[in-house]
Image: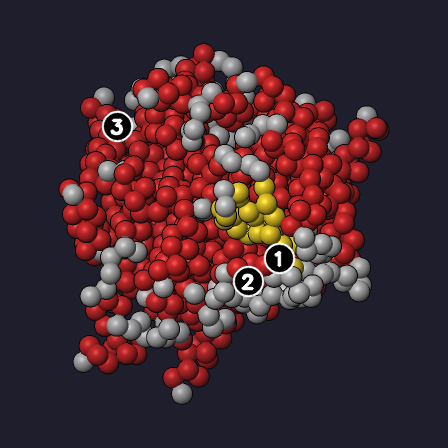
Amino acid sequence: MTGFNVELTITAAFYGLLCIALLYRVIKGPHAVDRVIAGDSIDSMTVVIMALFGALSNRAVYFDMALIVSLLGFISTVVISRYLEGRS
Amino acid sequence: MILLRIIIDALFLIGGFFALAGVVGVIRMPDSYCRMQASTNTATLGALGILAGTSLYGFFVLNSLAIGVKSIVIGLFILFSNPVASHAIARAAKRCGVYMLNKSGCDQYGRDNPQ
Amino acid sequence: MKQNKKEKKEKKAKNIIIKCGCDFLLPITLVLGMYIILHGHLSPGGGFQGGVVVSAAVVLVFLAYGNDGIRKTFAPDKMKVTENIGSLMYTFFGLLGILMGANFCRNAIFNIGNPGDLYSSGTIFWMNFSVGLKVMMGIGFMLIVMLRVLDVKNE
Amino acid sequence: MSIVNTLVIIGMVVCAIVTATVDDVLSCIISMGALGSFVALEFLLLHAPDVAIAEGSVGAVLTPVIFIIALKKVKGGKE
Amino acid sequence: MIVNYIGSFIVIILGFYMVLVKKNLLKIVVGLSLIDSGTNLLLISFGYRPASTAPIFDNAAQELSHQPFVDPVPQALTLTSIVIGACVTALALSLVIKVYEHYGSINADNVRRLNG
Amino acid sequence: MSGQRTLGFVSTFILCFITWIAFTLAFTVQEILGGLIVSFLVSLISSRFLIHEDPLYLFNPSRLLGALAYIPLFIRELVKANIDVAKRSLNPKLPINPGIVKVPTELKSEYGLAMLCNSITLTPGTISMDIVEEGGKNQIYIHWIDVQSKNPKEAGDMIKGSLESGVRRIWK
Amino acid sequence: MKRFFTIFFLAIITVIAFYVSGIISVSPSPYNGVAKYMVDYTIQKTHALNSVTAIVFDFRGYDTLGESFVLCTAVTGVAVILRKAVKGGRKDETK
């Protein structure tokens, strides 16, 4: 369309590759805390891929998804940390 | 037009580089707290660089106000919500006694709050 | 022993960062949920999704103030009643089709306003609103009940 | 975008394998949350934003909270 | 899109494996949730068509009007399915809590033996 | 007390309305009316949570200018710390020297403390772990990836020197 | 022995699933019939812009009715099963 498709696609693919690299920490985390950290990073990378895909398809409606995940993604992390604090 | 393209590509490159650095840090670092430090690297400049690029792309290339403003709002949300999660998980890790590499011999939290 | 207890109390009172973060994010979450409910016929979203986002307010209040804050803020009995009112509203707008001489859920009053406005598309707007009311109150009630389980001791 | 699609599917499958094979129940729940995140992204890539919003909001708010409450109530899930 | 079909079938089969083999009741509920996710993905993949866009008629879609739309019927059905999945998970977890209060154990074998 | 509550309601209303405008970006009569109703309902519920002390604290022009001046300062610190941590994690020898230090701060108000701690957490290399109050002064425990000094004063200057002066222009 | 049979059974299901996915992927879903009708008549019959919302709330309204009842039943079921928590809360409220 405007010639930007190549950059957007390559960046999104690069971020997807980094997500898979982060899964190494999910597989082999010695403690649950490591898995939580990796999951949190995966959440923020997911937001980035969603924004890139919305810009690539030129639809503003795809950005609502990224809004929700970026706003509410921290709840699960805080709840798990609350559980870990109470367990000790 | 060509200047705009160079700026947006530079923003994408910056974001990709810092995200790569953060992921390599998460994989390589020896203990949980240092992994947390590297993961903030991903969430701040790794995400904000791409979102700034997307916002410029929406404003000036696609001529769509909604895409630009929503990208900025997503960046603000990440800035507000990410440190809360990071702080909570760091405190929980220290409270439940996750191993900490103590190379400098300076652990004033463990000194003040013995288990 | 006494000193230990005092220290613990002080730590609990100083949990500032999570409290301030949740306080600041609470109105933004509510506005986002209402936006998703009310724009269900123009943009992706609708009653169920927005209702779940609004009911995240219960979790945010729990994270900031614990179960005491929930007890002071929400009234579970009224929430259950409101959920049933939402269900009845949905059934009424479904029956409106039959009352106007067509089948169930037929959109009988769709030609109010132009497509693209906020208040358009007749019963779909009101059905979105009633399902959103129902889901936010229902899921909120369920979350309150399940969070209160944490306070009940096992005998 | 088919490359991104393939990568997301691979991540989803890896998360599912971790969920099925790990011993600790808490780790099981955490990797299930990561799987929910991948599945929501995949819904968006298949041009279904409504379903993506539903899955994302349920996976971010409802599921982890009730799972963690149940885990807390059964005292860590050890038998 | 054969990748999507294979991936969703693998997720469904792993969920079956968890439900059939694991002894911990919480893990069985996790397996049910996994089956739910896989089925939703399979249903959405049926409706996908290449070079198309989301079925929303806003201003951007009027410019792209030469592109077809994705099939919206499976999306609507999946929306219902997700709600029911969340309800099933909540109800099953409250049953697990009740079982633990009653028997003092969430191992499926122990519960069956105590039941007589 | 009632007047205080009304002012808090008004400031929450303004925040909600700005958020609604940023979400919709449509300036027709119906959208504005819907935004007013939604903001009224939301601020009815959440004003008592959002407002901690003084409701009109941020509407002072000097504080708004301070908030604007904080943004470039914060971005500069962010980029510097990012480059530092990226260098450390990409270096094959992994030159880290982690430890936890305790740093005193002068801030009193809750939002000020939260803003300072969030800024410290967002700059990579440092994570704020806990806040305690000792002897009338708030102390922050900070995990630092490269401990250069164990003395609380020096470490405080290194970690939050310019950030704290920026925050103090906004909050007490 | 039981475990072996379980895994054998799962392996058979896996093979069948892969075979089925191969069959599905060569014949994509056609775009006529009910989907075409619903997309074409979305704006004309309901004035809504989002097709999925139009289907959920207008063309197939009975589905949403049933879903709503399922949700109501689930909430009531959770409240009945965890009755002790609700009662304890109410006692505290009256205090």
Q: Is residue D1 above or below residue D70?
A: above
Q: Position of residue B25 (x, y in %)?
A: 70, 58
Q: Amino acid at mark 3?
A: Phe
Of residues E12 and F1, the one drawn nearer to the viewer in this rendering: F1
Tell me what residue is drawn at x 38 percent, y 84 percent.
G2
Q: Nearer the viewer, mark 1 or mark 3?
A: 1
Q: Quadrant of residue D44?
A: top right
Tell me what residue is drawn at x 38 percent, y 28 percent.
F47
**Badge 3: few (under 14), some or many (20 or more) residues near its Cα, within 10 Å?**
many
Q: Which residue is mark 2?
A: B110
Measured Cα–Cα span from mark 1 to mark 3 = 61 Å
Q: Which residue is mark 3?
A: C93
Let me know if marks 1 and 2 both belong to one chain: no
Measured Cα–Cα span from mark 2 to mark 3 = 62 Å
Q: Is residue E75 above or below residue C151?
A: above
Residue B86 as seen in the image, left or right of residue A85: right
Q: Which residue is mark 1?
A: F100
